[in-house]
């Protein structure tokens, strides 16, 4: 056993103290080396990272371009308002948060539904509005309670507003929150940087077609942020450039009168200035209020619009394809003259129909129109004349001629989603059907094509374009809604359309003859009742598109359910000798052309030529007849 | 009567007050406290008043401790240790759970964290133990010491509170080391510890494993546990040589540094005062530790020597573990920066240590007298 030796014990202890001191020095040297590494060698790197932490580049969204009519009437504008926004990823329990907010700010069931829909469509790190258009008082109330709501903030935002409500909605379209499909378009245009802070995108109408003109150039702010992402102060900012302004060809007052003329009827009107292709009015009824879509539409309103049997969201002017009925006849006549298959004087004897291949194609007048030349065939809308003419021309000639007129192909109007319609031909049929027996073209089918029935299906804008081309002596302009785009930065006005798209090889004498016959329709034919005492000359043609469901039915016309009634067509231009306006009107289930569509044309032309404003929607002329059709 | 309130009376009273205090220790500790106040004013100004009160309390405790002679402390060693163990068992059975750990014991009138007590009780007991051996310590003595050390360390680690467990273990180990544990055993232990590391891994809590993994690759979890280390290293690195200036650290003022008034206050300091500031702090700690080791080397009894050495090395452990973790070379454990982090408990513990050192220094000649 070794007893304690104080001296030895002390020496051993002191040597251990020395070791400990050495250990401390080694460790501190290690720390010092680490500090040198971080603060000297790597300083620049960490300095950059600290700056990245501190400074956040916040995109500033530019003011969206205005939309004005041809006279400077504002159709779409922006206003600034406060919104209450939630970042779901930071807000914790959403239900609780919203319930808590509802105690200090009015949040309706509608707001909750809309928020839910936005949640489903968005990524969780986005901020989403729960309420828009807060009053100053609500803003103050929220700020007092802000500490209770992490992830909730007030933002000042610009909102799109369509001051006319439903007015011209099918032209303007609307904007909505950016979705994946929009992002793809943005990427395709390589506009990602410019759209970084943008939350809205044109969804339809001009808002969609001219999205990249209307958007403008984003600016950004350098903001110092804290660890919670809250902005502490602004360090610098670069200016935004507001979106370009669209000046439309539309005459807002004419558009208003045209919309009113429809009353609560469904249908479409397209009015074009023949010498330029300017669209003066483009109506599709019923319409809808695009303002509903701007903050994100709630699901109930969306369902109502989307599932309504009247289809208010469908732009009938460019996507509704209807058989043109008798409005097809002037163009058939023009084809006959141009191709030399008829002279104006050549007449037929109409005994009440045309027998072809064992099938009797009836005329609309019992016992027939008797002796019918080309003038009378248009003025009185004689079917038999066109049955025979169609047979003589043959389907290929008809298809080629009508194709040149723009029927069955997109007009190229500056709106998204335009439909082609159907220009029937053997080639079309082959493409359209799969079974060989359906693909075959039957000569009998050509006969009903001649009077604008059968497979024929054209959009109102195509019929308006054809009418305008005829009114402009065969010189065709691409119809367009934007007259010019005003560049915000340079102030330069960029006109959209100056050159004719095509000049058809028509003889002036043939044009004059057909237009003379169309003037006859207004003077003494099927359009005469609607235009009695008009005080100006005009050319026109009524038409009735048979609804397919009617075929073979044994119901009486007068007592038909409304949705089974024929569609009413009217094409017109005025004044007759030097037209300044040409149009096509379609009234769904309106009956004969003279019944529903022609009175609308009268109101529109009365305003455009005489400045007369109607007191009430155009009355339906129940006693009018389409020739003597059916 | 009038004389009682005279200048000389006041002077005598003051001299009596400061008599047990050690000038160098007081000076270094005072500088560190001033630094702490300045930092608190930058990192968390609203806590400044509270921390001043904490400091005042801690200084009073230090003064009391400085007056207690080591012999008296030696008598208290066993009762304090046993009380500490008792309280730890109490915590394990009845403790309150805060943030997933059972560390606090509610005594009805106050909540205490008994593990804190062990930081002093542990070296006290072991120093007493080695003092009481009549012979040079034998292997069996070291074994007994190891058991006395590992019981509370195990209890604390189980709470779980890895930071305190490490500190308590270190405090006890320093005593054993200073008592002369042979190098063969120390090296053998170190080797077997490294060998057993994979085994120990299985005993760690998920969050503790996570912290170790995070240390190895903080960027892997930049928004979770790695955030602390990433943000603190950014703060240190961006401070550069001269620092960004007092209250001008963007990482601090924009609240990117987590726990910036407690465990991560060193990141605040480092960002605002840079490498030069860090050198100053290292020097202050080195001086404090140097003074402590000097006191240990000159102490009168084995008990005093062992206690002074261990207490001094606790300071070092606090400082090294804290700065190492904030600088990203040690895992994140809950160890404050000594004398600087916000909080009364650690501060009082540390000043008890300083008070003990002062007492030992004051009594270094006692035996000869």
Image: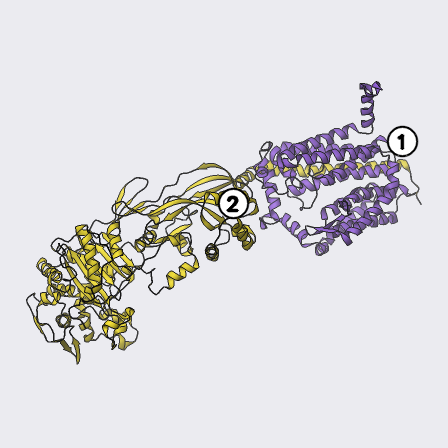
Is residue B295 visible in the rendered image? The answer is no
Label 2, secondary structure: give it.
helix
**Mark identifier at residue B114:** none
Is residue B225 visible in the rendered image? The answer is yes
The residue that disc 2 covers is: A142
Tell me if A386 is positioned left or right of B319 in this view: left
**Mark identifier at residue B366:** 1
Residue B203 vertical placement versus B125 (above, below): below
Q: Foreground: A99 or B175?
A: A99
Residue B81: where, in percent of width, then height? 84, 45
Q: Foreground: B175 or A229?
A: A229
Label 1, secondary structure: give it.
loop
Give the label, 2 or 1, closer to the camera.
2
Tell me if A179 is positioned left or right of A462 in this view: right
Query: Are there few (<14), some (14-19), or many (20+) residues within 10 Å of tag 2?
Result: some
Query: Are there few (<14), some (14-19), or many (20+) residues within 10 Å of tag 1?
Result: few
Residue A386 vertical placement versus B333 (above, below): below
- Which tint is chain B? purple
Q: Are marks 2 and 1 on the same chain?
A: no
Residue A587: where, in percent of width, then height? 25, 63
The quarter of the displayed image where residue B306 is located: top right
Q: How is the image coloured?
A: by chain
Quadrant where the N terminus of chain A is found in the figure: top right
Spatial separation of the CA atoms under disc 2 and disc 1: 71 Å
Q: Foreground: A390 or A401?
A: A390
Chain (yellow): A
Residue B329 vertical placement versus A576 (above, below): above
The quarter of the displayed image where residue B262 is located: top right
């Amino acid at each position: 056993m070794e007893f304690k030796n104080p001296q030895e014990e002390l020496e051993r202890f002191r040597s251990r103290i020395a070791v400990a001191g050495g250990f401390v020095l080694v460790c501190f040297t290690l720390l010092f080396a680490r500090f040198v590494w971080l603060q000297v060698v790597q300083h620049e790197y960490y300095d950059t990272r600290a700056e990245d932490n501190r400074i956040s580049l916040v995109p500033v969204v530019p003011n969206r371009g205005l939309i004005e009519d041809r006279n400077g009437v504002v159709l779409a504008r922006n206003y600034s308002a406060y919104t209450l926004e939630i970042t779901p990823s930071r807000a914790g329990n959403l239900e609780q948060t919203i319930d808590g907010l509802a105690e200090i700010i009015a949040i309706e069931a509608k707001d909750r539904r809309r928020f839910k829909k936005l949640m489903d469509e968005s990524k969780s790190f986005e901020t989403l509005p729960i309420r828009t258009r807060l009053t100053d008082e609500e803003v103050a109330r929220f700020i007092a309670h802000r500490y209770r709501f992490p992830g909730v903030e007030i933002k000042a935002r610009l909102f799109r507003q369509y001051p006319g409500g439903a007015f011209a909605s099918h032209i303007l379209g609307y904007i909505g929150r950016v979705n994946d499909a929009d992002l793809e378009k943005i990427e395709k245009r390589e506009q990602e940087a410019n759209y970084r802070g943008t939350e809205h995108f044109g969804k339809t109408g001009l808002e969609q077609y001219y999205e990249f003109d209307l958007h403008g150039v984003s600016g950004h702010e350098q903001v110092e942020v804290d660890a919670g992402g809250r902005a502490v102060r602004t360090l610098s900012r670069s200016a935004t450039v507001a979106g370009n302004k669209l000046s439309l060809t539309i005459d807002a007052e004419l558009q208003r009168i045209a919309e009113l003329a429809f009353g609560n009827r469904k249908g479409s009107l397209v009015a074009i200035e023949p010498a330029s292709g300017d669209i003066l009015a483009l109506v599709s009824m019923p319409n809808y209020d695009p303002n509903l879509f701007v903050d994100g539409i709630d699901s109930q309103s969306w369902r109502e619009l989307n599932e309504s049997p009247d289809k208010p969201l469908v732009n009938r002017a460019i996507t509704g394809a209807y058989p043109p009925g008798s409005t097809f006849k002037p163009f058939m006549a023009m084809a006959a003259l141009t191709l030399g298959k008829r002279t104006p004087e050549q007449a037929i004897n109409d005994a009440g129909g045309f027998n072809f291949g064992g099938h009797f194609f009836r005329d609309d007048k019992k016992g027939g129109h008797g002796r019918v030349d080309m003038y009378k065939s248009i003025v009185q809308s004689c079917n038999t004349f066109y049955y025979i003419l169609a047979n003589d021309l043959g389907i290929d000639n008809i298809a080629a001629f009508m194709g040149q007129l723009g029927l069955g192909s997109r007009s190229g109007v500056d709106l998204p989603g335009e439909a082609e319609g159907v220009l029937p031909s053997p080639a079309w049929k082959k493409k359209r059907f799969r079974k060989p027996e359906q693909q075959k073209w039957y000569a009998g089918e050509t006969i009903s094509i001649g009077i604008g029935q059968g497979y024929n299906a054209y959009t109102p804008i195509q019929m308006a374009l054809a009418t305008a081309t005829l009114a402009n002596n065969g010189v065709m302009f691409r119809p367009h809604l934007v007259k010019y785009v005003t560049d915000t930065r340079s102030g330069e006005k960029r006109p959209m359309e100056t050159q004719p798209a095509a000049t058809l090889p028509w003889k002036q004498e043939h044009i004059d003859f057909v237009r003379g016959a169309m003037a006859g329709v207004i003077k003494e034919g099927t359009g005469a009742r609607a235009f009695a005492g008009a005080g100006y000359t005009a050319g026109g043609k009524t038409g009735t598109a048979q609804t397919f469901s009617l075929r073979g039915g044994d119901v009486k016309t007068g007592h038909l359910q409304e949705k089974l009634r024929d569609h009413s067509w009217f094409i017109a231009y005025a004044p007759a000798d030097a037209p300044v306006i040409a149009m096509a009107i379609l009234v769904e289930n309106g009956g004969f052309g003279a019944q529903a569509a022609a009175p609308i044309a009268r109101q529109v032309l009365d305003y455009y030529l005489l400045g007369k404003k109607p007191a009430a929607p155009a009355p339906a002329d129940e006693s009018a007849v389409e020739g003597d059709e059916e | 009567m009038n004389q009682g309130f005279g200048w000389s009376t006041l002077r005598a009273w003051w001299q009596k007050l400061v008599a047990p205090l050690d000038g160098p220790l007081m000076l270094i500790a005072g500088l560190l406290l001033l630094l702490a106040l300045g930092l608190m004013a930058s990192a968390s100004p609203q806590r400044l008043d509270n921390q001043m009160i904490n400091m005042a309390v801690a200084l009073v405790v230090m003064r009391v401790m400085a007056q207690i002679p080591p012999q008296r402390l030696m008598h208290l060693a066993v009762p304090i240790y046993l009380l500490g163990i008792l309280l730890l068992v109490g915590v394990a059975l009845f403790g309150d759970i805060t943030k997933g750990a059972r560390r606090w014991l509610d005594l009805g009138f106050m909540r205490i964290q008994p593990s804190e007590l062990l930081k002093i009780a542990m070296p006290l007991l072991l120093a007493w133990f080695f003092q009481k051996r009549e012979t040079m310590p034998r292997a069996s003595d070291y074994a007994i010491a190891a058991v006395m050390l590992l019981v509370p360390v195990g209890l604390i680690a189980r709470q779980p509170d890895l930071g305190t467990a490490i500190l308590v273990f270190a405090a006890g180990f320093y005593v054993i080391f200073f008592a002369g544990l042979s190098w063969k055993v120390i090296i053998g232990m170190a080797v077997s510890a490294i060998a057993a590391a994979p085994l120990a891994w299985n005993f760690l809590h998920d969050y503790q494993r996570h912290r170790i993994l995070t240390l190895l690759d903080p960027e892997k979890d930049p928004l979770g546990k790695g955030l602390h280390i990433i943000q603190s290293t950014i703060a240190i690195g961006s401070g550069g040589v001269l620092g960004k200036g007092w209250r001008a650290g963007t990482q601090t003022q924009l609240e990117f540094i987590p726990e910036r008034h407690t465990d991560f206050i060193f990141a605040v300091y480092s960002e605002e005062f840079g490498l030069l500031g860090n050198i100053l702090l290292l020097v202050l700690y080195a001086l404090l530790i140097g003074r402590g080791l000097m006191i240990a080397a000159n102490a009168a009894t084995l008990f005093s020597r062992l206690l002074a050495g261990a207490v001094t090395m606790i300071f070092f452990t606090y400082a090294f573990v804290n700065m190492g973790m904030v600088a990203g070379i040690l895992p994140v454990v809950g160890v404050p920066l000594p004398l600087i982090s916000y909080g009364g408990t650690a501060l009082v513990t540390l000043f008890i240590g300083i008070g003990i050192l002062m007492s030992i220094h004051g009594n270094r000649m006692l035996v000869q007298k």
